[in-house]
Amino acid sequence: MKKPLILVTNDDGITAPGLRTLIQLMKEIGEVVVVAPDSPQSGMGHAITVDNTLYSQKVVVDKERGAPLEYSCSGTPADCIKLALQEILDRRPDMVVSGINHGSNASINVIYSGTMSAAIEAGIEGIPAIGFSLCDYSWDANFEGARAAIQKIVAEALVHGIAKGTVLNVNIPKTDGKIPKGIKVCRQARANWKEQFDKRISPTGKEYYWLSGEFELLDKGEDTDEYALSNGYVSIVPTQFDLTAHHAIQHINNWNLHE
Amino acid sequence: MKKPLILVTNDDGITAPGLRTLIQLMKEIGEVVVVAPDSPQSGMGHAITVDNTLYSQKVVVDKERGAPLEYSCSGTPADCIKLALQEILDRRPDMVVSGINHGSNASINVIYSGTMSAAIEAGIEGIPAIGFSLCDYSWDANFEGARAAIQKIVAEALVHGIAKGTVLNVNIPKTDGKIPKGIKVCRQARANWKEQFDKRISPTGKEYYWLSGEFELLDKGEDTDEYALSNGYVSIVPTQFDLTAHHAIQHINNWNLHE
């Protein structure tokens, strides 16, 4: 049987340990090609490079833990997918996986996530796609506990397919190497970030800010990704890119818009 | 009666004629404060500035067509909203409007849109928010035909509110100054971009690409934003930031994830 072609990308950049782990895991399942940003792209949301040049080159990052074909790209995660599909790959991949992100993309974080934007970009093109994130922001995070769940989810997705118009947002709890308790299919928890801006003065006297904030969970549901993660489970949220709030159409249809 | 406080932003930058038009229109409805990017941010999706400095300053762009309080910001549209809410405004705005974008944000464009990311950021914070876009990419686009519809939609939204968890994505057809035929409440059309990469060689011999593409409508529905626009109507799509594909949960629950 022909091995599936798996395109791997991320948003932490092509040298990130999370990406290296994902490459290793995918090499056991299929033929792997990597197209990933040449620098960190965290918080890039679904940005694409418009009105600017895009560089890409074949690279060897890590002979031992790499893929036979790896390309770095000066753009965003969404750019990487577009470039891979249009210019780099000679056939359509069977799956796109993005990650393993160093940090959570559960709940409202999905909106800001470069990791997930790569998966969504692939989904828009009709390719089964999954974003993986470990709830540990450190560069030397321990990905051991995540391995079995990631391989199981990719294998099942290859067998069953992923529903049209959706991609998977998979988050893995920080377990310091231990196997999570299990895997739960969830909805996105309602939450936001309580921003704090740290105001400073530059050496030349200009005011500037650092954005920081605290995550604020606003959802007591037990069917959410945040609930699963806080109880030691891997969360899978099927995520869509048709953003229409169908339930709200009726409300607006009663507005006085037609005089 | 106290005038509503309206926060105005965009993604084309603080000097864009579309923003200037929106400021004028909102000044007839409420008290206006502008916090907008100091440079074009098209295609920035829901990017935010992480691990980088953010500058903001009070500016006067256009005495005649400006607001009493305007701030430029070095960040993305989503950054502008966060900074405005946390640092600049002394009270919570009654509404956030973003635009008028120079170019369509209908259909799948909503995913890449900086204009809409500002509205969504406000929606996440629980503030009624609307993104406005004119389907004309030129800098000197004619916004005359858009005026009445924009004022009507904002006025109705102030009266009726916007459903919790949603923001409005309003697109206005290119009419060269004429009034659109009417306003339709729609769903997001299914579409994608067929990418084309223009490959070139830099003066120093490096390969680079320009991203371009053609919009490909994949949806024959007559209830879509694209259908309304192509028939001369303004489209309103209620847009949500809970991306959970609830209909797909059942499918994944039958996967073999628990052994």
Image (cartoon, coloured by chain):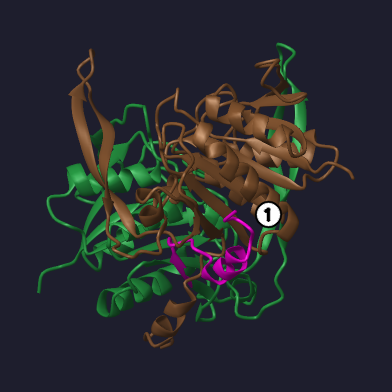
Chain colours: A green, B brown
Asked whether the viewer can see residue A103, the reply is no
Q: Nearer the viewer, residue B122 or A223?
A: B122
Residue drawn at (28%, 35%) of the image: B211
Q: Residue at x 30, y 66 (%)?
A: A128
Q: Residue furthest left?
A: A1
Asked which secondary structure carries label 1, the reply is helix
Which residue occupies the extreme right position in the image?
Answer: B1
Extreme-front residue of the structure:
A259
Instruction: Read off the magenta span.
Output: A237-259
Q: Is residue A94 above or below residue A75?
A: below
Q: Position of residue A108 (x, y in %)?
A: 60, 59
> Which residue position holds label 1?
B157
Residue B238 appears anywhere in the view: yes
Quadrant location of the C terminus of chain B in the rendered image: bottom left
Name the amino acid, label 1.
Ala
The answer to whether B237 appears left or right of B54 in the picture is left
Q: Is B13 positioned to the left or the right of A20 in the image?
A: right
